[in-house]
Amino acid sequence: MNGLEDSLRILSEAAGDPALIYLATIELKFPELSPPERASLREALEAAAVPHWCDREILAALLDVDQDRATVLWEKLSGLSVVESFRARGEAARNVHAAARSAIRHRLAETDLDHLRLLSSRAANHFSSDGGPADRIERLFHALLSDPDEGIRILEQATSGWIWNISHEVRYALTMALSELLHEGLLTGRAELWIRVMIMEHRASIEGDSAFREPVAQLLSEARAVGDRRLIAEVLVVAGDAARSSGDLGSAHAAFEEYRMMAAEMSEQDPADPDRRREVANAHGRLGDVALDRGDLDKARAEYERNRQILATLIAEDPANMNWQVDLALAYGGLATIAGDQGDGAGARAALDQALSIMAMLSGQDPDNTELRYELAVMHLRIGILAHDEGDLVSALQAYQQFLAILTDLTAQDPSNVNWQRDLAVAYSHLASVALDREDPDGAQAANEQHLSIVARLAAVDPGNTVWQQDLAVAHSRTGDIALARNDLGSAARAYRQNLSILTQLTVRDPSNVAWQRELAIAHSKEGDAAFQSGDLGGARQAYEQYRSVSATLTTKAPGSAFWQRDLAIAHAKLGDVASAEEEYSQARDHYEQYRSIMARLVDVDHNNTDWRHGLAVALWRMGDVVQDLDDARIAYQQSRSVMVGLVTQNPGNANWRMELASIDARLAGLDQEADTDVTDL
């Protein structure tokens, strides 16, 4: 019998079974070997197909043979066409080709599942030593199949630890490995549910949380049915995140509160386990996020502070724990947001400095970790927003550019990550805003076109995603701002109507979402700006009154919010402008007095906030413009001038402030001239 006939016979005996065909490559490659030797090689190839990669040490562990025997077998296996180099795991590493590996594992599962579990158990034991994230994934993969309870225990530990400190490439590898187990259909009950939760968490981090509300509801029902409290807690987090992203703050709060209660109970049952205490901290942080969305700043601060306290205690026990350090940075970020909203600029800066310091340190220690770089980027964004709110445009621009640089790099690494894509759009949005404030409409338009392009694409993919709809509204609003700066009133009005339409739909969907309510108020304000500049004073008054009404309602919900107080002050200023244009000076004076009173209170809270000091100066000179008594007008102008002199002294490079100071001086000179005229007439 010649070689061709032997090959045909061997393939015929495989009877079309893909696994047998791949195993038959041994007979075709080594016809000179004895039947027992070929049988040993077939057994070795089956073993090598169980893990995702293999070498002689792994093969020795799988076959339970010494290194010399494993070396002989490995050298022969390495010559097969179905075994290929796998340099990602070392120079000597190789893997069984994906199609061959899948077929062989499938045949083992069907014909000798116990042997497959034995090989998986040996693989899990081999990878038990910490050789890095790839080894941990491999250990988890094999433990879930060989001993599901042990695999679940490892997975639970992973969710509290190393899973959140790996690059997005490694996280993809984990998801692919878990998906393989799910596809093979060899796991049931708790193990299967845990795998589905982990896959969903990863997909939500890439595709956005809101798309998974229905699937996570089904998972939560199944988790409750099996009674695994740790699993239920994990699903509750995903459910709360999905509800919050969808704008359903009531459901989000309910999910996070149940999570907090469950985490607290588990921590009380096992107080020595730091991971259970970390979960309690995590629950407080998420409840703080919801409270902030609702405008309950006192509740949000209390939750964030409790989160910070628990984490500080944990870090004192284990300063090297990177996950806890990241959580602490995020806690400081939340506290900074509260401080900023309440007008405590110094407190906000101090908290952000703490957060940035932690994230810069961690990212420097592991520069390839995309999650750490992302959180570092977010801290730059928050610093930029704070600087922008305080009128420090140079610092704001620098921070926004750092945010953009990191997000540009991250999205280039993984274009499919829609959360990163969304944040890239956010970077362009803030750059457009600061360009407008720097009187650079061309730069603003270029940045906003990038912003609008990204968010329009995301919103089209998932129209039900309220976060992306809000982003789309912001992009339309910015388009209107740019058109208004160029005196293109028609384009501005159209863009503002698109913004108002989206925000109206969102606030109808969830009236409790105060962030959307504030955006709606601002949308009315901008609609009024376009009407005012076009000479439609009636339309402007109506829009500004809507702005005032919504802002007043928000301030009653959260009296401590400095930014909502500022919105109310600006609403009165704009209504005063309309009344002044209509020569209704008494009404104008009343509105300007409200404007002045609010800005004065804000300046008392944070005298370093140049934006608020500037607002106070503007309120005072507008008061001077409409009062009838010349002495009252002079007092108002002089007080305004005093504030403006302080601002110009602090930042002499601000051309707008210098022009405004000159305008106030001109008003005072006009009053002096008018007084001289009155004396001459006498």
Image (cartoon, rainbow, N blue to C red):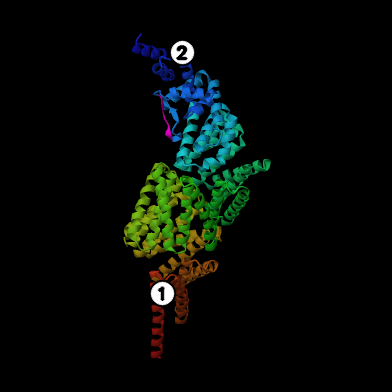
Residue at (45% x, 39% y) in the render: 169
The image position of residue 399, as x and y in percent, is 44, 57
**What amino acid type should be assigned to the residue bearing mark 2?**
Pro
Residue pointed to by mark 2: 35
Check residue 540 for magenta coloring: no
Q: Quadrant of the rendered structure where residue 614 is?
A: bottom left
Residue at (60% x, 43% y) in the render: 259
Q: Eyeballing the image, is 456 above or below 522?
A: above
Nearer to the camera, 53 or 601: 53
Q: Name the residue furthest top.
A: 1
> Which part of the image, by quadrant, shows the C terminus?
bottom left
Classify mark 2: helix, strand or loop.
Answer: helix
Q: Eyeballing the image, is 677 above or below 595?
A: below
Classify mark 1: helix, strand or loop.
Answer: helix
The image position of residue 391, as x and y in percent, is 44, 64
Q: Earlier in the sequence, mark 1 or mark 2?
A: 2
Provide the residue span drawn in magenta: 82-87
Q: Quadrant of the rendered structure where residue 384 is?
A: bottom left
Q: Which mark is residue 661?
A: 1
Few, some or many residues within 10 Å of mark 2 (<14, 14–19, 20+): few
- Cα distance between the residues tagged 1 and 2: 99 Å
